[in-house]
Image: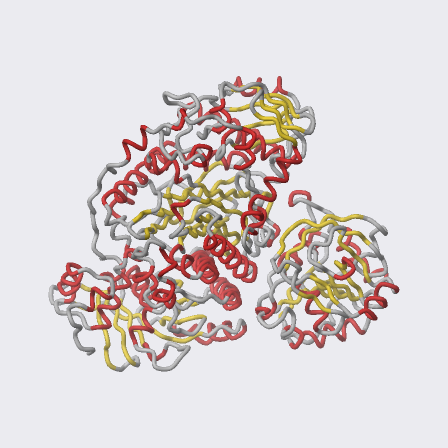
Amino acid sequence: MVPSPPQSLHRALGLSDDEFEEITSVLGREPNHLELALFGVMWSEHCSYKSSRIHLRRLPTTGPHVLVGPGENAGVIDAGDGIAVAIRIESHNHPSAIEPYQGAATGVGGILRDIFTMGARPLAVMDPLFFGELSDARQRWLVEGVVSGISGYGNSVGVPTIGGELTFDDCYRANPLVNVLCVGALPKERLVLGIASGVGNLAVLLGSRTGRDGIGGVSVLASAGFSGEDGAASLDEAKRPSVQVGDPYEEKRLIEACLELLDAGLVVGIQDLGGAGLICGTSETAARGGVGMDVDVSAVPQREPGMVPYEIMTSESQERMVAIITPENLEAVRALCAKWEIRASVVGRVVEPTLQPNGDLVGMLRVRNGFDGEVLAEVPAKALADEAPLYDRPRQYPAWLDDLREDDPGDEPIGSANDDLLEMLVDPAWVYRQYDSQLFLNTVVGPGRDAALLRLAGPGLPNSSRGIAISTDSNPRWCALNPRTGTALTVFEGIANLACVGASAKAVVNCLNFGNPEHPEVMWQLSEAIDGMAEACDQFHLPVIGGNVSLYNESGGADIDPTPVIGLLGVIDHLVTPPPGWNWNDDDTLVLVGARRAAGDRDYPLGGSRWATRRGRRGGEITGVELDAFTATIALVTGEVAAICAGETSDVTAVHDVSGGGLASALAEMTAVAGVGASVKELDSHAELFSEFPGRFVVATSDVDAFAGRARAAGVPLFELGVVTGNRLIIGSMIDLSVAEIAERRRGALEDALAAAL
Amino acid sequence: MKRVGVVVFPGSNCEYDARFAMETLGVAAELVWHTRTDLSSFDGIILPGGFAHGDYLRPGALARFSPVMKAVAEFARDGGAVLGICNGFQVLTEAGLLPGALQKNVGLKFLCQETTLIVTSNASVLTSGAALDQELIIPINHFSGAYVCDDETYARVNDSGQIVLRYRENPNGSRGDIAGLANERGNVVGLMPHPERAMSTLLGSADGRVLLESFVASYVAA
């Protein structure tokens, strides 16, 4: 046995004194170095969700179409026609803060493995990204690095990147956020789970050799804040070795090899090795199967000599999987892996659970040096995987929040609406042009629109004329003012985005990016956000089928604004024609569909709006939506667009949801894309131009009487805005801009900001 | 054409798309692993897009050594129709089946975007069915798509009608706006744009059809 550690070692591994006591109690003795290291990574915040689990339980997770809910590698729904769709979202925030290219690249690699682990072929990736303002040179370096990391890895591995989000706010200056969502599809019957079963079965390590990269990634890096005022900038040298390095070519061959193994029925269970590496993959599969596992560290192919067992077991070297197979299939597995030039090494054996002194049968995870060699560590697999402490950390309403809510930006001087509008327009094309967004011939609506829309098709899938839609949404400005309402509104915003492409929401995944959970105000924000998400999902019978919690997004003691990112998966039953998009036509009539005014005291609230934030006014109140009107509006818009997608003729020529930047921005974006202007009547107020609340759509129609009739019949409020005409966007007396100026400013905004000093 | 082989190197990723495009045109297509050395059962060969062998060295630099490439060269020598799309074009130049080379894009960024192509010669299996000066909207998707060659080569391919497609607006710094290039006989063609991604208005454009229909018809015509 390895000698017992000195008392202070557990702290260096990220464990508290209480946790050390708990481990001693679980084992009935003091852990040795290796055992302590295994608990250190498995009980990290990143792996165990120990601060958030107690709250996540309040989310609705079930529904008749849910095949796999939270807790597995990915959530899976039945999309119809014998096809299941898997979806997952993850964060790779801290690695990207330190090494943007590799941080973002390995974020993509990790999420793909979560998806093909379920037996699904990864079909699309989306990337919500959050940085500080681009006037700061470090932010420009981060943007360039993150985008080229996603591009370099995603394009090469052969999975299209079909959308995302791009947010700039000073609260992310020292702690950028890089989230990544992936969807995949599989024939329903191929669904597999990460379970080890069958005593005598073998655990085969597939893929890359194991090196010293990424050791302590989940504990040292992901589960602690950046302490310096400048965040990651001052910590590069100390934490850089905890960032992994990606190899998309290895991953591509790994995907193909694993899907072939699954198709050939050669595996019992399969699990990717991501955060916490081999110890996570083996203990989780054993815990799910209720069995024990012997792992031989000497059998693990190593990238460099002299690695010690602790390093081998916790390394986060990328592009590795563990497959559980029966011994008689070993040769077939080896042959198939040889074709794809993938390493396959037997590193573990499934063993009987062990009878404990108290009479319980417990599956033990034993780390050995040679299968019959010395036992280096012996711990209950369940204790590592499932029995991390559960914390109900103190929560407190932030002392600063009342003052912030009272500081309503409604009294902000109006200034030039023309200038404000131009400054808010940003075309993210500079980003998404660098991504392959079209592979697999599924992309009907790609990046840069309300939601992405894909044909539900891919190699090995049954034929279907259905489509799936995916959106990612966040609004940290709303959530800073009111995390509960803000998160609920974010869900509604996602539903509205799916409506624009004719899809009905079926499931939610979420990535909860918050600050330091040891700050009671952050725990309050997290708890409120989860309640807001639960309420909104309940109202629409939407199951939450997966999520990720990223805490400790702080630097120098300052937490980021609460940033729950909501990913929505929708389905459209018949997709033969693209949805109308933003491209309106000359002489169309423009209407605002949905409740024109907000539900609260103010008709057009500006609190949390992009307009107010740009003025440095971050205060004010946000208001919820009036549910009946919202539901009716969503049903009308979804139905109108779905009919067009099904091939029916329609008078509706363009649809765009009113969101960030308000009604003025929505009209300007459509102007820029269509290349035709519009003449819109005088609105109620300047605030109506820029107020942000979900449930409103700009619709262009070639037959306003017909459309108004259908809206009336559906009980949906409608307000006639004006007509599409000419080469200027004119909104009453407040906005008058040429189409060319709008298009040029929007197109160049990002490139100009990035070019500032490059 | 009855049967097309779509070569798959480890790291290829457009093989299913190429096969689907062929099937859309009513032609059977089979994925061909890169170690295969007998292509006699095929009427045409496609080298699809992707990152053959990872492309860590230089796009196509390793793929030219895959066993299948000797068979592809023989297939081409015997007059068979060979089409290289994107990475496939890069492989064909590395293998010496087409002159010149593909360099990193001007601007040093990966580009996935719509381009407008102009048909500048129909003396090839890819463009025989298209009209001269016809404009086609077809997307590109590459990091290394800037065609380069020496002056003598350029004069030769230009004079002999081997430049089959040019960009209307050059996106990547390609010499002479070259988007697609054929060998002297016209039976081997490489292009950086992806015609298989432009087979349906549902996905934005069906302009790739005329090219792939030409390719499919070429065997019959020949």
Q: Give the quarter of the figure containing the C terminus of chain B.
A: bottom right
**Residue A688 percent location from the top left of the image:** 48, 24
A238 in relation to A335, above or below: above
**Residue A20 percent location from the top left of the image:** 17, 63
The image's colour scheme reads: secondary structure
Nearer the observer, B162 or A519: A519
Residue at 22% across / 57% down in the picture?
A387
Q: Give the quarter of the figure containing the N terminus of chain B.
A: bottom right
Nearer the observer, A287 or A685: A685
**Residue B155 percent location from the top left of the image:** 85, 66
Location of residue B18 by image quarter: bottom right
Location of residue A487 by image quarter: top left
Question: Is residue A490 rendered to the left or right of residue A81?
Answer: left
Question: Is residue B95 rendered to the left or right of residue A209?
Answer: right
Nearer the observer, B201 or A400: A400
A701 in relation to A310, above or below: above
**Residue A418 percent location from the top left of the image:** 56, 30
Residue at 55% across / 41% down in the picture?
A426
Nearer the observer, A678 or B24: A678
A752 in relation to A614, above or below: below
Can the viewer see residue A137 in this picture?
Answer: yes
Can the viewer see residue A635 in this picture?
Answer: no
Question: Is residue A720 rendered to the left or right of residue A47?
Answer: right
How many numbered circles does the render carry? 0
Extreme residue toward the right, this view: B159
Location of residue A199 by image quarter: bottom left
